[in-house]
Image (tube, helix red, strand yellow):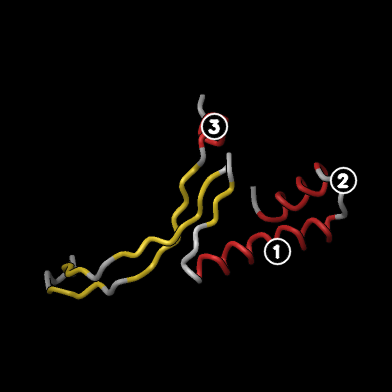
Amino acid sequence: MNKSDLIASVANLASLKKTDAEKAIDAVFESITHALKKKQEVRLIGFGTFAVAERPATEGRNPRTGAKINIPAKCLPKFRPGKQLKEAVEL
């Protein structure tokens, strides 16, 4: 499912126009992104939790030359699925 499929599905399920569904979905994504930029958690009970994980700087090796390289620290978004989502996906 891509974004346009998601918009069509939300519009159908919520009896909305596609433009209204697109605005709502964009607002949700923007809100989650804004919270993660501020390193806040976004908890959606039953669905899951979006959070930011900090990865420390490490030293690695170039696989071609074997030379040591420094890998800088960075923050990455993480998602932990909630119990209801896990149960819905289990086969």
Q: Earlier in the sequence, mark 3 or mark 2?
A: 2
| Image position of 25 with respect to 85: above or below | below
Give the secondary structure at mark 2.
loop
Looking at the rendered structure, the kind of residue marked 3 is Val
Give the secondary structure at mark 3.
helix
Disc 2: which residue: 15
Residues at marks 2 and 1, CA–CA distance in whole angstroms:
18 Å
Disc number placed over residue 11 in the picture, else none? none
Residue 42's image quarter? bottom right
Residue 72's image quarter? bottom left
Q: Marks 3 and 2: CB-CB under 8 Å?
A: no
Looking at the rendered structure, the kind of residue marked 2 is Ser
Looking at the rendered structure, the kind of residue marked 1 is Ala
Disc 3: which residue: 89
Residues at marks 3 and 1, CA–CA distance in whole angstroms:
26 Å
Q: Residue 22: image x %, image y %? A: 76, 60
Residues at marks 3 and 2, CA–CA distance in whole angstroms:
25 Å
Q: Marks 2 and 1: CB-CB under 8 Å?
A: no
